[in-house]
Image: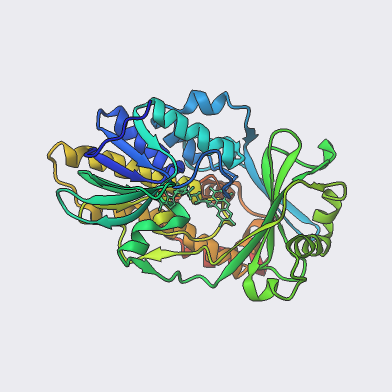
Amino acid sequence: MAKWLENPDILIVGAGPSGAIAGALLARKGYSVMTLEKQTFPRFSIGESLLPQCMEFIEEAGMLEAVNNAGLQYKNGAAFRRGDTYTDFDFSEKFTPGWGNTFQVQRAGFDKLLADESAKSGNNIFYEQEIIAVTPDAQQPSAVSRAIDGSEKTVRAKFILDASGFGRVLPRLLNLNKPSEFPVRQAYFTHVMDNIEPSEFDRHKILVSVHPEFKDVWFWLIPFAGGRCSLGVVASQAFLDRYPEDPEIKLRQLVKETPALQHLLRNAEYAMPVRSIVGYAADVTSLYGQGYALLGNAGEFLDPVFSSGVTIAMKSASMAANLLDRQLQGGSVDWQTEYAKPLQAGVNAFRMFVEAWYDGRFQDIIFYQGQSPEIRGMICSILAGYAWDQKNPYVSEPRRLNTLAEICRSN
Ligand code: FAD
């Protein structure tokens, strides 16, 4: 039973993946933790294809058994299609040691599972509590929460972790928002009962399909357990505005223009109204401040193409929880060199790959048939989420992508 704490050691804003993992880790270390979540769970969220690297953090937070037993769709790789060319990466081929499999998840149930596991570890989670004000302070930062009945309460903690995702609570309240360098892109998505013949689709992999005419327009098809798939398209807002206004007609028309995907989905039934999210790329001037740190999407969000969001969210949760443990025990922590910089090293590796995806370099690399297994293994590591492995030359020197793309293009 969750207990309301006026003075917890740690106050967490939001009970999504980053909040649930950080809360479990800190509660398991013996700290008093309270998480205030604006919505009720289960609730819909986008971000349904996990990467193997995030299994490490699920395990660290003591949630592995629950996640393994949840009947989720097993995932062991990523497949890409452009025109008649198809290529797939099996995570077992990756260069970096570690987990080589994970799951694809409907986030409503998955996020509830993580939050419930976090609560079992001692994280006191309260739903329908929206954080509306925050006062930073090195010793005792505080926050005001508003319940659904309008009543407000102040919580004074030793530290605040902002895990509010796209809510971006501290960036908004403390003026930390910085525009992303990426152009404004938009996604339209839904769930379908896919009715795909088993022989036509490897359900253990996410399928990313490129529009035949526009290489910066792409679709995800993420299979779940039970014959359901998440289907989405990503493009610039200006491009999508050229299509009919009705979201379902828009998505159907774009799928129709992409023959192999249209063929795969020829018997699909749309199982949910088509939704849209726009301008999701975001950045901040700082990932930490007086008595607080930003986790996951509350910090920076790049782009969905490599399914890196939940992995970055969980990585940041693990890093921050371990640093906070030291700090609360009286040790000193340099949040710039020990949190922001190393976290951003991985985010920057993903950034290089995202840029290379949209300008076509990455596509030319993966669709090139003559790639050496060693290089494929290094690329595969990034696709599996191991963007912090400095031993991988494509992490430590991402400019190598340029040379590689040139080689692939000239062959
Ligand atoms: P969230 O999951 O957003 O959780 C934040 C929580 O904070 C929410 O429950 C919210 O209600 C709560 N909150 C917000 N404001 C307040 C407040 N004021 N007070 C209290 N609580 C508050 N990632 C992947 O890993 N794989 C994918 O396939 C993938 N696909 C994506 C596709 C698209 C189109 C987009 C835009 C993103 C995608 N992502 C994907 C990214 C993924 O959605 C996020 O990175 C991930 O959900 C971040 O987790 P989080 O814990 O930081 O935040």
Q: Where is residue 363 in the image (x, y as percent from the top left)?
A: 64, 62
Foreground residue among 71 and 50? 71
Look at the picture and state if 411 lies above or below 390.
below
Look at the picture and state if 103 lies above or below 173.
above
Residue found at x 45% / y 34%:
115
Q: Is residue 403 visible?
A: no
Q: Which quadrant holds residue 27?
A: top left
Q: So how many labels did they put on this image?
A: 0
Asked whether, in this view, residue 141 is left or right of residue 119, the answer is left
Q: Where is residue 72 in the image (x, y as percent from the top left)?
A: 62, 32
Picture quarter with the C terminus: bottom right
Residue located farthest toward the left when viewing the structure as drawn: 330
Q: Position of residue 325 (x, y in %)?
A: 23, 37
Picture quarter with the N terminus: top left
Asked whether, in this view, residue 376 is left or right of residue 268, the answer is left
Residue found at x 47% / y 37%:
97
